[in-house]
Amino acid sequence: MGLTLVLGGTRSGKSAYAETLARASELPVRYVATADDGDGAMRERIVAHAARRPAEWETVVAGDSLATAASCPERCVLLDGLGTWIAGVMHRAGADVQDAPRGAVQARVRDEIAALARAASSTRAPVIVVAEQAGEGLLPAEALARDWLDALGEATQVLSAVAERAVLVVAGRAIELPPAIGATASGAATAGEDLRHHGDTLVRPGDTDHAVNVLAGGPPAWLREALRRALEEDVSAYPREAQTVAALAALHGRAPAEIVPTNGAAQALWLLPAGLRPRLAACVHPGFTETEAALRAHGIPVARVLRDPEAGFALDPAAVPEAADLVVVGNPASPTGTLDPARALLALRRPGRTIVVDEAFMDLVPGEPASLVRDPLPDVIVTRSLTKSLAIPGLRAGYAVAPAPLADRLRAVRPPWSCNALALAALLAMAQRGPEALTEAATRAQAERADLEARLAQVPGLRTWPAAANYVLVRVAGGAAVAARLRDAGIAVRPAGSFPGLTADDLRITARGPRDNERLAGVLAWAVAG
């Protein structure tokens, strides 16, 4: 996983932030201590640091061999802090004596930093180095202080050049630094992943579409009429959202201040990193990957919480790192279709943590069981979308429902006129019709999925899981080749290997009408047989 360099001034909160990252690794931790406890005041600080660390963390003293102390491939290594270690090397070498071999001390520091950089670049476990931010003013008058500052500045630059992430902590707040020139962007996804790959790119003209999880046939007649009216009356003025906001609030039993219309639910999720600025986000996977893409694009550390297929992909709240102050989960989840009970979602709540539930598919579930959209919880944000149920992906009609303080933070970073006049008209028409507006879509989605599940059950070699929306996750040996054969036959499905936690053997198949489902199942049986 490589090196993370955490920089900051004295008492900036850099050590606490680094400890948060170490906890989030969910690996055993080796804490490399660099301070000398011979001084009474320093001894008190060492005791305070140790008291806040988990008792099970292993602690070793760096001594002069920094790379050796930090070499532990089976553990997350947290080295705190670099400037203190450099000062110790200088002190033990007698560098504070007039005739001390200053050049030799500097060379020793350089060698150890180079060795640490090599070790951190090659290990699979994370290495976190905490360092004082090198001087931001005049050079000290004392030669020893200048030597220390020179060594520290050079060391942090060497480590920063090879670090996957470099973070500056100021007043307890972490600021992600841009990557070094020529380096990979900080926080990038694992090699080979594409968090921004979506099913709509897989459907060619003329294909039978089982890849996009939008109900077929386009919007219902009542919505077409509302859009026609809006096209004639509303698009000549800038969008005005007050009426739509009031209608959505009434629909969900919330206050207008709690409704934030957005350019689709995806934009609501993209507002999270800038609006909330979490220290550590946890994304529950498999799930909609745009959330993690947004967080990483904003330099937010992300911990992945993987659902277990052997447990039916059920949400395990205990698997979420305690340090996470933002948790994002889909319900129902895509591409698994898992519907988690409200009690599992509520078990994610912790003091200082915000929960975001992406309910983009909830309106395809009759009665919307487990929805939290009507619950005015101070730490829960719900995102919704009309894309799937009303077949309007081109309009980008979505919204967030959040307690007013959190809604204000999302609005503060939302671009102006995010929700266009046609999207606002669609949201208004749906809200004014009430829950029955989506009843037909939910009933149809359930019938089409049940029909598909029954047909898939007759195809040998498939594994499926219970689903609540309008798609089914299928696991089949040689899934990529199976998808290619279906494509050759003019049938598009969604290979699911780009979802964290799934493999190239996984396919998401969207349910359609009985005739299309029947053809899909027949061609799939042929494709599986090879």
Image (cartoon, rainbow, N blue to C red):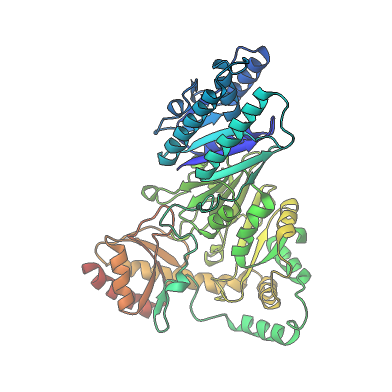
User: Would you say 263 lies left or right of 449 here?
Assistant: right
Q: Is residue 33 visible?
A: no
Q: In the figure, 364 relative to 98: above or below?
A: below
Count of picture labels: 0
* Residue found at the far left of this picture: 529
Foreground residue, 517 or 174? 174
Q: Measuring 65% from the left and 20% from the top, which residue is drawn there?
A: 45
Q: Position of residue 148 (x, y in %)?
A: 62, 27
Q: Is residue 257 visible?
A: yes
Q: In the figure, 336 relative to 38: above or below?
A: below
Q: Quadrant of residue 46?
A: top right
User: Would you say 267 lies left or right of 525 here?
Assistant: right
Q: Position of residue 348 (x, y in %)?
A: 57, 43
Q: Quadrant of residue 72?
A: top left
Query: In the picture, which quadrant includes the C terminus?
Result: bottom left
Query: In the picture, which quadrant includes the N terminus?
Result: top left
Foreground residue, 312 or 194? 194
Q: Position of residue 313 (x, y in %)?
A: 42, 51
Foreground residue, 349 or 121? 121
Q: In the figure, 530 relative to 257: above or below?
A: below
Q: Measuring 51% from the left and 53% from the top, which residue is drawn there?
A: 182
Q: Position of residue 97 (x, y in %)?
A: 62, 14
Foreground residue, 520 or 183? 183
